Image (spheres, helix red, strand yellow):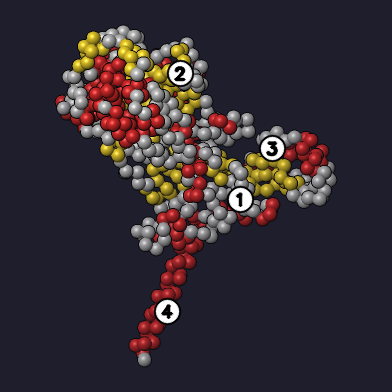
Amino acid sequence: MRAQFRSRIRIILALVVCVTFLILIRLYFVQIVHGEAYAQKADRQFASGGSGLFDRGSIYFMRKNGTPISAATLSTGFLVAINPQTLENPEAAYAAITAAASSTLSYNAFLAAAAKKTQVYIEVAHYLSEENGKKLAAKSIRGVQVLRERWRYYPGGTLAAHSIGTVSYGSGTTLSGQTGLEAAYDDLLSRSGDVLYKNFFAELFSNVGNLLVSAKDAREGDIVTTIEPEVQTRLENDIAKVNQRYSSQRSGGIIMDPRTGAIIALATYPTYDANNRQNVNPSLLGNPLVEHVHEFGSIMKPLTLTAGLDAGVITPQTTYNDTGCITVNTARICNWDLKARGVIPMEQIIVQSLNLGAAWVATELGQERFRNYFTTLFGQKTGIDLPNEGRALFNNLSKPQQINYNTAAYGQGVAMTPMQMIRALGALANGGVMVHPHLTSSIRLKSGIERKLDWSKTIPVFGAKAVRDTTEMMTAVVDEKLEGGKAKIPTMSVAAKTGTAQLTNGQGGYYSDRFFHSFVGFFPAYNPQFIILLYTNDPRNVTYAADTLGSAFLDLTHFLIDYYAVPPDRGFATTTPA
């Protein structure tokens, strides 16, 4: 009996210890993890319909040294509401509120609201600062309520606006992510009205092998991106300069780590400030780098050459007879300058950007093999963690006419998004393997647990030897051709290619004087840390991409080399291509 009694006492004691432990953990969450939220909840005395303060997870940039920088957070201040039934002096109230509010308050709209005597609560002003809100509250104006408020705030303003995205009511009655990462991770960033009481155990056990609670159940979290703010700032400034200098319709750029798919910077111009969207054209809110498709022109040639090398139909020493122009299926295609080169090796197709050379390689490949390579490169979306990703358009390659394959070989007649293009070209910088481009590296739960995201899925496309041969050709572009050879960096090998595509006229043909310019490059050429893709759409009074984007690419390359202290790769035997 005594033994049974002692066993029961031990069980009861163990239960008491466990309960005490859980209570202590709960107190930690209430006082430390959610302490600020509870304090603000207590500070808010009234809200229409009993709704709570707006709450949402944060989004962070990540500096190169691993320091997070806020990209999207919450700002706290006050809103102003009136009670028309008790408001005694609307004119005086209007003057006081206008003096405190940061945004313009319509006099007529305010008086119309004050005249609605059947209502007791109408919000008339938002986003008052702490100082102004407290000053207005101190006046104790009868019928005027100053209430605690929180709203979405983007400290960087325009910085990475298209990637971070926006929050609004959309078509519903609750605030939610509408574009960018705000939309892609809305389920994780959103907070329900009783968020302070939910997901305690979900967060506590979410990393225990998912045995007790699915990771999806731990919904609350902050997003840590791969975007480096200094690099993002530099890319945005350079893209804006190109667009403004040449009066382009739009320009954009992507900087990616070709080994992992991490997007270091993603920029498009024109842009917008997510903190002030009242006068923003809605067409600017989407992300053209993942949504819009383009015919990229000659930056497709390295992919065509690599396919030919990989299939074994050509070698770097293979030659062809370049006649300047040819006729295929009654259509005439020519080199950019209409000039013949005679018998020349494969490298010159890249160095001199020869359309006939790319078309010749496509013919040697044959339609089925060419189509198979293109399907592997562009047949599926990239899976980038941004909404509304577009699909590549290469229906021409389902037709039997050889002209469709010849023009696709140099980037006309097929279209893809910039994100699809950099992923495909990234295979040349990653040993022939395509990676999974992404903007988010990890999720930080409110408990402090950080969950790394898995982006390791890859797609083999080319053999390493074919990629290395093409890289040599692209390196010759910088060393010999770009800026007449003056662009060569003595201590760093850089592989690059320009692209100039004619714009479609909407009637089945092309403009002769309107172009889409693109530029791609990666470095160090034989062990790349970065790949850069730039484009500008319909630049005025200039024909070739080397003129519009060459300087921007070189400036970004030098900036990245200095900023990341990329070690030189020239002058060392270990960096010489095999």
Question: Sequence-wise, which precedes: disc 3 or disc 1?
Answer: 1
Q: Tell me, yes or no, whether the two marked residues, 2 and 1, touch with CB atoms within 8 Å.
A: no
300 sits to left or right of 126: left
Residue identifier under label 3? 101
Residue 361: image location, x then y, percent: 26, 22
Disc 4 is placed on an element classified as helix
Residue 378 placement: quadrant: top left
Residue lying at the far right in this picture: please name it: 88
Residue at the (60%, 42%) spot, across then down: 170
The residue that disc 2 covers is: 509
Q: How many marks?
A: 4
Mark 1: amino acid: Leu
Instruction: Give the mark nearest the N terminus, 3 or 4.
Output: 4
Q: Is residue 335 above or below residue 87?
A: above
Mark 2 to mark 3: distance in Å?
55 Å
Choose the circle earlier in sequence order: 2 or 1.
1
Q: Nearer the viewer, mark 2 or mark 3?
A: 2
Disc number for residue 12? 4
Percent x, y of residue 530: 32, 30
**Residue at 41% across / 61% down in the picture?**
213
Q: Is residue 375 visible?
A: yes
- Tag 3 or tag 2, which sits nearer the N-term? 3
Question: Which label lies toward us, 2 or 1?
Answer: 2
Residue 240 visible here: no
- Name the amino acid type tagged 3: Ala
Mark 3 and mark 4: Cα distance apart in space: 59 Å
